[in-house]
Structures are given as C-alpha cells and as structure tokens.
Image (tube, rainbow, N blue to C red):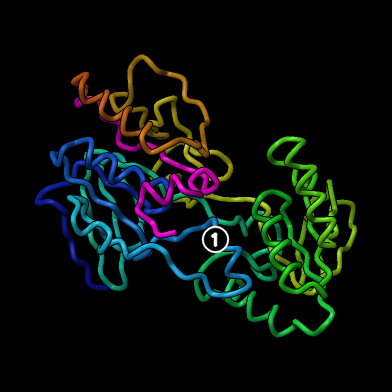
Amino acid sequence: MSTELKVVGGTSCDVAVLGAGYAGLMAAPRLARGSGGRRRIVLISERQCFLERVRLQESIVGDVVPRFPPFREFLARSPIVFIQGRIASLDAARRRILVVNGRAQQEIAFDEAVYALGSGIDVATVPGVHEHAYRLEPGDGSRFVTVLRQLLKMRGGQPTRVAVVGGAETGVEVATEIKTAWPGAEVMLVSRSRCGEFKGPRVERAVRAGLARLGVVMIDRTTVTEVRQDAMIADGGRSIVCDICIWSGGLRAPDIAKRAGLHVDGQDRVLVDGQLRSPFAHSGRRRCCSPARSHWSALSPVSIHGAFFRRIRCRRDQEGREGTVPPVRLLDIRPGHCAGEKWRRLLQLPQ
C-alpha cells in the first residue's frame, strides 16, 4: 500500500477535531471564531456530509433528503481545514493521528485533539446481534437501514412480526415509524427496564399511551441474551419469535481511544475530568493535565454545548497555560440535545 505522509499546516495543526458529528461540528467553528484565526484547526471525518442521526428513523419509511451541504462546501469560507478519511490510529504521546482514505494515508501532527467520534450500536456484546439484527446505521451494509426498508416494503402485504430491542428514544421512534407505515405488522418493543422510561413519569405515561394506541406490544423488564435468525432468546430461556429484529439496545465507542492508551470504560468511552481532559492510561504524564486535579471521573457521554468547550479553551489561553496543554479532550453531544430550531440556526440549516 502506498503511503503519503502529510502534515497539515506546514509542520503541525494546533487543534485536530476528531469526528464531524453534532459535537465535532459545533466545536470546530467555535474554536476557530474564538481564536480569531490564530490557530490552525483541522476537522476529520470519514463522511463527506453531515449525518443527522435524529432523522435516521425517518429513513425506515423513505429516503431522507439531506439539509446540509458537504463539509468542504460548508467550511469553504472558514479557516478550518477538512480532511476526509477514517481515523486509523491516535498516538497521544507523539501527538499524531493516522488518517486513511482509500489507499492513501496521511499523518497529522497536532498540539491538542478534540475527541468527538461518538458511539455506534453495540453489536458485539450480545451473541447474534451482528449476524441477525438490523440497526439504524446509514450505508449499504446488509443489516443497515436501507436494507431494512426494502425488506419491510417487500413484506408489506404479509403477516410480519417485528421486534425492536431498546425501550428508549430510538427504539420508541423505530417502533412507531414501522407501526404507522405498516399497521398490519405485529410490532413488539422490548426493554430491560420499562418502555418509554427515559424522561420521567409524565413522558413515560404519554409515550406508553401513544404506543398502546398504535397497537405496539410493550415487553418490559426483559433482557435479550441472544439473537437468532427467527427468534430472540431472553433471560430465563424465554423465546420471542420474530421475523425481523431491530437492535437499539446499547452503544459502544470506537476502540481508537483504548488503543491510544487513554482511560476508557467497559464500552470504550473515554474517561475525563471536569474540564473534559483525558490523561494517558499507560504513561502517567500528568504534565498534560492540570496538576491540581488528580481524580478522574467518568463523564461519558458528556451532554454539553460546544460553547462550553470554547469557554474552557479560551479561559485556559488567557491564563497563559499553554505549557500544560492536554493531548486529548472529549466532546460528546447527544443528538437529542441538538435537534430543533436552535441547531438549525447554529449551522444555518434550512427549515
């Protein structure tokens, strides 16, 4: 494989933003505005366009028209450099990122990195999920949402048993989309807790009442331990027969941070301190973090606003502490916090 070694911005970039989802795409422009053009900022994403994850359930019924221009077009008038490619590795000690795009590779040197790669559906923990369960992921994978839509349309006139695993926001949205579009389907919503139990009692009552009106069968306090081709096995050995299984029962972050030697939890999410800083897991180089903070708490996912991150960064600059710049900060924003009019105004999205 041919290798192209390229360091952006001459010898380095000041800030590399890893991931251009909700968090990364809020952080990069705000950092650029806050620095007054003095910092070289790189935004790295495997996708060339922004993915609105809060709208993925809509693609079960039909194609979703993008409301966002490609990153290069969106950032054309800004000082931010966009690099498309998959982040293959992060070397926090050397402050290097390896980005792969097709057969080309490039190494990017950075002074500080913002880790905003987010999470994806966990298909590794429960046996059979990867092979037999569909999930809300874009693309052409055999178990991704496009294939799911085709299968549902093909079985539209047939009796179909659909089991949706995960009783939180995504699972509820998937179940209601399917039951509304294909009212003849038998739709089950399976949850380890109670279906709709994610925003307090009032929301739970309203969600459960809506699901009941549609005819969605709610299966509460049931843990799925295995997924098979035509059934799911729950705790206690109970079998739940289904023709289609859709999985939204947990998230897992990429293992890039773990391989880089950063502190992570059981789902490979980065562990950080109160200012979103991550130390090295293996070297103990405390110079990368504030000497006054020796306790590291798990704040992942951190549901914060991109402006908060900018305030942290600018305040540290004003204090003249560039010599203690941590190599990696975590920035993770749940999509639910970014939907609606405020998000559209921030990124100039059309209605």
In the image, is residue 284 part of the stretch drawn in magenta? no
Residue 272 appears at what percent x and percent y? 45, 31
| Relative height, residue 17 to residue 178 (above, below) | above
Residue located at (55% from left, 47% from top): 336
Return the residue nearer the eye: 320 or 304.
304
Question: 46 or 295: which is nearer to us?
Answer: 46
Is 14 on the left or on the right of 283, as rendered?
left
Mark 1 residue type: Arg
Give the side of residue 141 with respect to residue 204, left or right. Answer: left
Which image quadrant is residue 312 in? top left
Q: Is residue 81 left or right of residue 125?
A: left
Identity of the residue drawn at 80% across and 49% down:
208
Q: Position of residue 280 (x, y in %)?
A: 38, 34
Question: Which residue in the structure is indicated by mark 1?
Answer: 55
Check the picture and name the quadrant holding the C terminus.
bottom left
The stretch of residues the image draws in magenta is 322-351
In front of the other: 318 or 199: 199
Position above or below: 75 against 92? below
Asked which quadrant contains residue 106, the reply is bottom left
Q: Residue 329 colored magenta?
A: yes
Residue 236 percent location from the top left of the image: 89, 52
| Residue 124 picture quarter | bottom right
Q: Is residue 145 left or right of 308 when viewed as pictured?
A: right
If the image is split into quadrants, where does the N terminus sit? Answer: bottom left
